[in-house]
Image (spheres, rainbow, N blue to C red):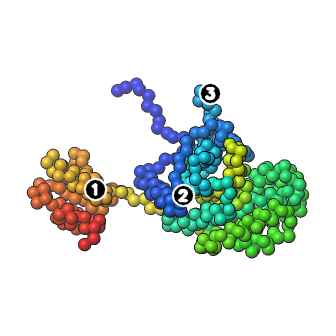
Amino acid sequence: MTDKKLITPRKLQGFWELMPNEEMVFEDMLDKLKKCFKDNCFVPLDTPNVEYSEILLAKSGGDLDKEIYRFTKGNNDICLRYDLTVPLARFVSMNLNTLDFPFKRFQIGKVYRGERPQKGRFREFYQCDADIISENLPLTYDAECIKLYENCFKALNLEVVVEISNRKILEGFFKSLKLEEKIVELMIIVDKVDKLPKKEIIAMFEENGLKKKDISDLFKILNSKGDIAEIKKQIGEITQDSTFQEGVTELEVISSRLEAMCMKKENFTFNLSIVRGHNYYTGTVFEAFLKDKRNLGAIGGGGRYNNLCGYFIDKNMQGVGMSIGITRLFDILKSENLVKFPSSFIDLAIISFDENTLNYALTLMTKLRAEGVKAEVLNEEKSFKSKMKEANKKEIPFVAICGEDEMKLNKYTIKNMTTGEQKTCSFEELLKLIGKIED
């Protein structure tokens, strides 16, 4: 006996941790996304999890500042990154003279936000980002980032709908009301329209200078949805402000580009209530939802930021990007039973009986792995019956038995654990039997 006090194992709420069978499925999703990004001519990038606070806080603003993990180490004031876009702007600013533009990069990594953990929201989560940066960035690239959702979700065997807007429309509306100085606060309120009771939202607008007619016109804008023709019909008479009209024109261009890129019409729509929470967006904004499951919330979003690098360099670099909240997506798929988790990722278990046959089994395992077969020797000192039970419990589809008789014949006895069929065969026959090579 010992007087040592044991520590209760526990982890912080809102931080990411999966069981091995879940992790295998999650990593397979990441591999598919990486391939999709590369197939669309984006190059990989990785940046540090921590940055100087002055970098990450350069243009965060709003409620986000309260969610950032900030601390000091020695004389350094640092933060855990809350997204992958600001670190990208810092990277581009530092390597401006060596990068080729337009610079198209993708990055998959963990980000951190100190918000209250709840269903679908985490303090630590993965983001998958794809961004395009250049000094002059036509709207075609906005459309390319939107189209990328269709490609990515197709790779995951899922269907997506992207809802698109342009912040210039609301900014132009607020400018027409002489409320330029309150645009940041008003945009934050707009982003909460679907999250708070309407009475509270109206009160917040009134506190910021909007009159009843203004609020009525604003909700007319926010309720505008459909294709670009419908959008123009719904909001065409509200204001002739130049910024407002510029936003509408940009949506027309994007609609045309998406059609040229053969994006399915049912996979995108326009929704003027989309504004995104980050203040660095300056034009196009969009959010992605699982088709027919909008009630589950957005699983991705992005937009254009024309002046993000302006906080680090005197050169105006334009950017547009899309992001997939892959942790949130995985959590939704799991909770909605839309993903299957196999009990085992082993193709074949190998059973031996003694020291001599163990070496024979290990040789078979090595040869099979070289052929791409996930083979594993059940090496614990257990009875043959116990090992068979173990293979069955793990739902391993095939078992190879390596005994003295098999070793003398240079063959193996293979059992199909689903059908119960058993056969002694050569190595080549074994590969055919488990479906790794064709007849």
The residue that label 2 is drawn on is 42
Asked if marks 2 and 3 touch (Cβ < 8 Å), the reply is no
Mark 3 neighbour density, 10 Å: few (under 14) some (14–19) many (20 or more): few
Front: mark 1 or 2:
2
Instruction: Calculate the distance from the C-alpha at mark 1 to the C-alpha at mark 2.
Output: 32 Å
Instruction: Calculate the distance from the C-alpha at mark 3 to the C-alpha at mark 1.
Output: 51 Å
Q: Is residue 274 visible?
A: no
Q: Quadrant of residue 64?
A: top right
At mark 1, the secondary structure is: helix
**Sequence order check: which comes first, mark 2 or mark 3?**
2
* Picture layout, residue 229 above or below residue 57: below
Q: Residue at x 71, y 54 (%)?
A: 306
- The quarter of the image holding the C terminus is bottom left
The residue that label 3 is drawn on is 75
Q: Amino acid at mark 2?
A: Phe
Q: Amino acid at mark 3?
A: Asn
In this rendering, the count of numbered labels is 3
The residue that label 1 is drawn on is 370
Q: Residue at x 70, y 47 (%)?
A: 315
Instruction: Calculate the distance from the C-alpha at mark 2 to the C-alpha at mark 3.
Output: 37 Å
At mark 2, the secondary structure is: loop
* Picture layout, residue 416 above or below residue 331: below
Q: Amino acid at mark 1?
A: Ala
